[in-house]
Image (cartoon, rainbow, N blue to C red):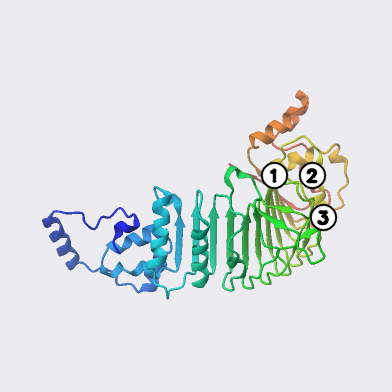
C-alpha cells in the first residue's frame, strides 16, 4: 500500500538529494532505534492515541512500521481530518479492505459531518461488530430514518455512543428501537433520537432500557418520545443518569425505576415532570436549568423535581437554576418538605445565556430587573438549606 492512497502528506515518489539520504542512512545505522525495538503491543497502544489517518502515515517511517497500522485495535475516523468527504470515504473504504481481517477492532469512533450513504454506514457497523468491537461511537449529521439494527444486538458492546443530527436540526427524526438486546452494555449515550411506545399492551409509555442487564451509565441528549406520554427509565443496574433537553414538549413525564441510581444530572429547559419515587440510592443531583419563555410551567416543574428527589445528600445547581426557581411567586415563604439529608450544596456561578437573560427581563419593571440581575437572588441559598442548615456551601465561579 502506498501512502498516497491514504491522503498522507508523504509522497513515495518524492525525490531527495542523494547526499542527504546517504547522510541520514549513515546516522540511522549508528543510532539505536529504541522506539521500533518495542513490542507490537506497546507500539499499537501508542498509536491508539492518534487518529487513523496519522496512524496509517507511520507506515513510511521504516520497514518495522510498514504494516503495523493493519493491527490497530483502536480506529478514530473523523471526516474533519480530511480536506474533502470524498477522500475521507475513500480512506475508510481502503482501510477496512486492507486491514488485517484477523485483528479485533476493540474501539471504533466514527464521525462524519455531512451526508453519508446508508451502505457506507452499514459497512462500518458490520465491520466493527464482526471484529468484536467493545466501544463504539458513531456521530453523523444527516437524515437517517434508522440506524443499522445490527448495533442493537451486538454481544461484545460495552460502550455505545450514537449521535444523529439531522439537517436543519429538526430533532427526533431517527427512531430508536423499542427495546435493546445488548447484554454486555455498561455505558450508553444517545443524541437526537425518538423513543417509541413499547407496545405489548403498554401503549402509553416508551421503555427502551429495561433489558440492558449491566447498564451503569446512561446519557439521553436532546431526545424525544413519539406515540407515548411517558419515558419510563427502568433499569436495575443503572448508577449514573444524565439528561439534556431544550426543545421537547412531546412527553410530560419521566418515570425513574432505578433502585441503584446514585447520580442524576440535568441541563437545559425542565419541560418534563419527573417521578423519582423508585430511586432510594440517589445521593448526587446536578441541575443546570434555564427557560426561554415567561411561563411559570418550567419553574414549577423544576420545584417539583426538588420534591421528588427529596433525599439527596449532594446538590449542585447553577446560578441560572436558582434564577428559574426564583420566578415562582413568594418562593421564599414556602416551607420545604424535602432536602433534609443534604450534606453539600454547590452553586456554580456562570454567565446567563443571552436568550435566558432576555427572557428574565421581558415584561419586568426596572426594579424587578435589578433584582434578577443579581448573581444570586437574595435568600435563595438559605431557602434550599432550611432543612439542612449545617450542610457545607460552596460558591464556584465557572467561565461557561
- Badge 2: how crowded within 10 Å, few (<14), some, or many (20+)? few
Q: Which residue is drawn at 44% across and 69% down?
A: 73
User: In front: 69, or 336?
Assistant: 69
| Residue 192, image x, y percentages | 63, 52
Quarter of the image that includes the N terminus: bottom left
Q: How many labels does the image show?
A: 3
- On the rendered structure, is 169 left or right of 44? right
Residue 359, compared with residue 28, is above or below; it is above
Residue 181 is marked as none
The percent position of residue 179, horizontal first and vertical second, equals: 70, 66
Q: Which mark is residue 382?
A: 2
Q: Report the mark closest to the observer, 2 or 1.
A: 1
Point out residue 173 in the picture as x, y percentages from the top left corner. Answer: 65, 51
- In this rendering, position of residue 336 left or right of residue 3: right
According to the picture, the residue beneath numbered tag 3 turns out to be 308
Residue ID at (66%, 66%)? 216
Report, in whole angstroms, how far the alpha carbon at label 2 lies from the one at label 3: 20 Å
Q: Label 3's element?
A: helix
Q: Name the residue under label 1.
A: 247
- Which is nearer the N-term, disc 3 or disc 1? 1
* Separation of marks 2 and 1 at Cα, in angstroms: 31 Å
Query: In which quarter of the view is residue 365 placed?
Result: top right
- Can residue 389 be seen by looking at this rendering? no
Pointer 2 or 3: first along the chain? 3
Residue 87, image x, y percentages: 39, 52
Q: In which quarter of the image is residue 254?
A: bottom right
Amino acid at each position: 500500500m502506498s501512502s498516497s492512497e491514504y491522503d498522507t502528506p508523504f509522497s513515495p515518489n518524492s525525490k531527495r538529494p542523494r547526499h542527504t539520504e546517504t547522510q541520514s542512512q549513515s546516522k540511522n545505522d549508528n543510532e539505536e532505534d529504541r522506539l521500533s525495538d518495542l513490542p507490537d503491543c506497546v507500539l499499537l497502544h501508542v498509536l491508539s492515541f492518534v487518529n487513523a489517518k496519522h496512524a496509517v502515515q507511520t507506515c513510511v517511517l521504516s520497514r518495522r512500521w510498514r504494516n503495523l497500522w493493519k493491527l490497530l485495535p483502536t480506529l478514530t475516523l473523523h471526516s474533519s481530518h480530511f480536506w474533502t468527504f470524498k477522500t475521507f470515504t475513500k480512506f475508510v473504504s481502503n482501510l477496512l479492505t486492507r486491514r488485517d481481517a484477523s485483528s479485533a477492532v476493540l474501539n471504533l469512533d466514527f464521525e462524519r459531518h455531512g451526508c453519508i450513504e446508508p451502505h457506507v454506514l452499514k459497512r462500518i457497523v458490520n465491520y466493527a461488530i464482526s471484529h468484536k468491537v467493545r466501544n463504539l461511537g458513531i456521530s453523523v449529521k444527516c437524515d437517517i430514518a434508522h440506524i443499522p439494527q445490527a448495533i442493537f444486538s451486538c454481544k461484545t458492546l460495552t460502550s455505545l455512543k450514537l449521535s444523529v443530527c439531522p439537517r436543519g436540526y429538526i430533532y427526533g427524526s431517527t427512531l430508536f428501537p423499542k427495546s435493546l438486546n445488548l447484554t454486555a452494555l455498561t455505558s450508553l449515550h444517545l443524541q437526537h433520537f425518538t423513543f417509541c411506545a413499547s407496545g405489548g399492551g403498554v401503549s402509553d409509555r416508551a421503555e427502551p432500557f429495561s433489558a440492558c442487564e449491566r447498564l451503569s451509565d446512561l446519557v439521553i441528549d436532546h431526545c424525544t418520545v413519539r406515540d407515548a406520554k411517558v419515558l419510563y427509565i427502568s433499569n436495575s443496574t443503572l448508577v449514573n443518569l444524565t439528561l439534556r433537553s431544550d426543545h421537547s414538549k412531546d412527553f410530560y413525564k419521566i418515570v425513574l425505576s432505578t433502585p441503584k441510581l446514585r447520580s442524576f444530572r440535568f441541563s437545559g429547559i425542565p419541560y418534563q415532570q419527573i417521578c423519582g419515587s423508585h430511586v432510594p440510592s440517589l445521593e448526587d443531583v446536578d441541575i443546570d436549568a434555564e427557560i426561554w419563555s415567561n411561563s411559570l410551567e418550567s419553574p414549577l416543574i423544576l420545584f417539583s423535581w426538588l420534591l421528588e428527589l427529596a433525599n439527596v445528600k449532594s446538590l449542585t445547581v447553577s446560578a441560572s437554576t436558582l434564577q428559574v426557581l426564583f420566578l415562582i411567586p413568594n418562593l421564599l415563604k414556602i416551607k420545604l418538605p424535602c432536602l433534609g439529608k443534604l450534606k453539600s450544596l454547590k452553586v456554580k456561578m456562570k454567565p446567563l445565556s443571552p436568550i435566558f437573560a432576555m427572557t428574565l427581563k421581558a415584561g419586568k419593571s426596572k426594579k424587578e430587573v435589578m433584582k434578577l440581575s443579581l448573581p444570586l437572588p437574595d435568600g435563595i441559598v438559605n431557602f434550599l438549606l432550611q432543612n439542612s442548615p449545617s450542610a457545607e456551601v460552596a460558591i464556584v465561579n465557572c467561565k461557561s
